[in-house]
Image (tube, grey):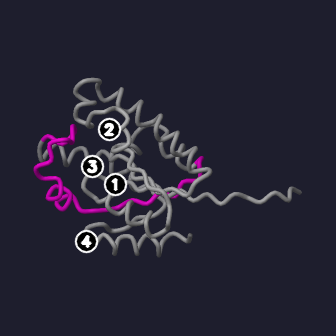
């Protein structure tokens, strides 16, 4: 029998469709817990020196997904040492093997669930989202990703106007 302490992994991964509030809620949750926060898409943009739409247009979605996966693996390794809240990209968990990877690193997944019409309202006028072309493609993409979101450890309603209330619900779900 070993007497070494068992490390407690403090890694919360927020997922959901574009417009559900992952970045806003993630920043608030991290601040509340005193943890670090990383938005996967924002970090990719920072490292690439271009926005997601430009990456898709200039290098293609496969390149973006490769960069996304590499950064995700880096953050999961960081989450072994540091307490971390990560806002995943809307399509991160729809990539092959993503959920297995998240679970293998002890990440707690929280789906910020929001009705489709509210998501469309929140995303109306966005031009930097490469996969948001029109209402029909928005719905099709949402429906394609929904089964992946439903695999989360926890589901929290994110259709309220108060992101602090969403943070409170997350804190009620996950024992820290």
Q: Which residue is mark 1?
A: 16
Q: Which residue is mark 4?
A: 160
Residue 22 point in image, percent of width and height: 34, 57
**What kind of element bears circle 1?**
loop
Please tell me whether residue 108 belongs to the stretch shown in magenta.
yes
Q: Which mark is residue 143?
A: 3
Depth check, mark 1 against mark 2: the one in front is: 2
Which residue shows up at 24% across the image and 24% down it?
58
Residue 112 point in image, percent of width and height: 35, 61
Please tell me whether residue 52 belongs to the stretch shown in magenta.
no
Q: CA distance from mark 1 to mark 3?
A: 12 Å
Q: Which mark is residue 118?
A: none
Q: Which residue is mark 2?
A: 45
Residue 47 point in image, percent of width and height: 38, 35
Is disc 4 surrounded by few (<14), some (14 to 19) or many (20+) residues within 10 Å? Answer: few
Q: CA distance from mark 4 to mark 1?
A: 15 Å
Q: Magenta stretch? A: 104-133
Which callout, 1 or 2, points at the residue further toward the start of the chain?
Answer: 1
**What kind of element bears circle 4?**
loop
Circles 1 and 2 in contact, beta carbons < 8 Å = no
């Amino acid at each position: 029998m070993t007497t070494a302490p068992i490390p407690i992994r403090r890694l919360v991964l927020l997922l959901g469709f574009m417009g559900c509030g992952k970045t806003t809620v993630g920043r608030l949750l991290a601040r509340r817990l005193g943890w670090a926060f990383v938005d996967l898409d924002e970090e990719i943009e920072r490292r690439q020196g271009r926005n997601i739409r430009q990456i898709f247009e200039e290098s293609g979605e496969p390149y973006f997904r490769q960069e996304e996966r590499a950064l995700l693996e880096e953050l999961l390794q960081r989450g072994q040492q540091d307490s971390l809240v990560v806002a995943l990209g809307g399509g991160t968990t729809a990539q092959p093997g993503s959920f297995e990877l998240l679970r293998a690193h002890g990440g707690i997944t929280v789906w910020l669930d929001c009705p489709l019409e509210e998501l469309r309202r929140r995303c109306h006028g966005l031009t930097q989202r490469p996969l948001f072309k029109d209402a029909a493609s928005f719905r099709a993409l949402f429906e394609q990703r929904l089964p992946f979101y439903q695999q989360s450890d926890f589901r929290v309603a994110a259709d309220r106007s108060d992101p602090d209330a969403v943070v409170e619900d997350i804190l009620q779900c996950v024992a820290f």
